[in-house]
Image (cartoon, grey):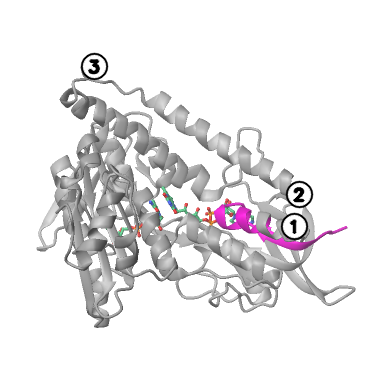
Amino acid sequence: MSKQFDVLVVGGGPAGYVAAIRAAQLGFSVACCESNAYADPKGEPRLGGTCLNVGCIPSKALLHTSHLFEEAGHSFAEQGICVGAPNIDVSRMIARKDGIVKQLTSGIKALFKKNKVTLLNGHAAFVERKAAAVGEVWQMRVGENVVEARQVILATGSKARHLPGIPVDNEIVCDNIGALDIDAVPKRLAVIGAGVIGLEMGSVWRRLGSDVTLLEALPDFLSLADIDVAKEAAKVFARQGLKIVTGVTIGEVRVSPTGVSIDYTDKDGNPQRLDADRLIVSIGRVPNTDGLGAEKVGLQINARGQIEVDAHCRTNLPGVWAIGDVVAGPMLAHKAMEEGVMVAELMAGQAGHCNFETIPWVIYTSPEIAWVGRTEQQLKADGTAYKVGKIPFAANGRALGMGDPTGFVKVLACATTDRVLGVHIIGANASELISEGVVAMEFGAAAEDLARICHAHPTLSEVVHEAALACDKRPLHF
Ligand code: FAD
Ligand code: NAI
């Protein structure tokens, strides 16, 4: 006997659980199935996907602890707080992180109960599309159950890309899963890939005392970010002792029970070797479509392994949608959630919408890096005439009071209409400050609009205000 629902959501990560909740709010009967990739000790499926279990949340917990550790060791004394050299108890740091994960993943179960979303435990695979009493339904196997639903939302997420021939044991060679559970501060840590995970996890372990080297294939560092931000970040990270080597080609990687030895060619073609106690491989992520039965029902998957969708996340199959990391676009939890809401609302006949132009990016290093919209190099390449307002945190009273005056805010606005085209921040609390840029861009604001808004004093947000004023060459405090 099959279970029947209006909507079956496959995957309980940020894309899937949000889509399930929103669909239930809109009156659909909804089931969400989770393949139990991150089971708790009782074998119960853990909701929250990569983000809550082995991604956003645990990494930010470790970033916070390691940031405090670094503050205690370096900047407390400057402020007259004398505590002596701090020690790190790695097992307590990891246990705290695990506690936060547990609390949040159980919280989603509670949200499912509240919204009457049925949680199914098991891996889902398409069986067939079959005739129903009225119209047609999709039949899927979910673990031991057969489930039928008119609408299916595929939110199966992504997994770490590994280097060919270099098995990840999550002891010596780690992907994101092992990197979040290292049980002692490695003396020497190597990271392959100086992208978002490499920088965040590299920062965690550097702050705790590791000698960290990141090996990056691309010739330019942080090429996704605005060029000024990338330059400033490279300078600050080098000062902190994070070694970033760009333009490398990774060769043989030899792993022993106690460490790893990486042969690589540097950007000048010279052979080099890096020895380390642990290695983190963070070279991007691949969409998850394993065992979904895509070929059985003719679900279109593109050459990059993503489920092919239109701008509204419709796949080539009627009634089947796909959202989050498994489709094109930035692999970010908030983008995944936005798509979840959009699809649920479209299914309900509403005008679901996701503005891909205003999705913010944040890298939670110290200083934090955040941006929304176009970078200066993109505007140049597009031939768009633009104005720049760029103001450092160095003259901001709040930043000085916090002992954190590194970085700047850069606002890019259209030279003819003054419309804000991009906001780029490197500095303390950039992750929170960027929301102002997102709101401004979402409302089609001009730089002048930002400049005319009263910003509380003393706050870091005054630097956003000044940068907007600087677009019109009239900053007041710089
Ligand atoms: P996932 O979170 O991957 O969830 C997919 C779920 O589907 C999984 O639980 C999986 O078990 C399940 N599943 C897969 N196939 C099936 C199947 N056939 N049947 C049933 N269930 C299935 N993003 C941010 O925005 N901010 C951050 O700070 C951030 N930090 C990150 C840090 C790290 C270390 C990593 C690795 C990622 C980070 N991300 C961050 C990215 C973020 O985690 C992802 O973009 C987000 O989790 C994608 O959500 P999703 O629901 O599409 O996929
Ligand atoms: P990434 O795409 O950010 O970075 C991967 C880096 O590895 C790139 O710079 C790439 O050039 C490099 N690389 C690829 N192959 C290589 C090779 N063979 N040798 C050396 N370098 C190589 O991917 P990452 O860091 O794995 O993270 C995956 C995704 O997870 C991110 O793109 C992001 O979407 C998400 N994420 C988001 C976070 C946030 O929002 N703060 C934090 C962490 C992850």
Q: Could you tell me how far apart the alpha carbons at marks 2 and 1 are, in whole angstroms?
A: 8 Å
* Residue closest to the eye, 400 or 260: 400
Determine whether, in the image, residue 201 is placed left or right of residue 311.
left
Query: What residue would you read off at disc 1?
Result: 30
Is 470 part of what is drawn in magenta?
Answer: no
- The disc at residue 116 is 2
Specify the segment rendered in magenta. 1-20
Query: Which comes before the other along the chain, label 2 or label 1?
Result: 1
The three-letter amino acid code for the residue at tag 1 is Val
Location of ligand 2 given as a quarter of the image: bottom left
* Residue closest to the eye, 429 or 206: 429
The three-letter amino acid code for the residue at tag 3 is Val
Q: Secondary structure at mark 2?
A: loop
| 64 w.r.t. 425: above or below | above
Kindly check if marks 2 and 1 are in contact, taking CB atoms under 8 A apart as contact.
yes
Determine whether, in the image, residue 68 is placed left or right of residue 313.
left
Query: What residue would you read off at disc 3?
Result: 83
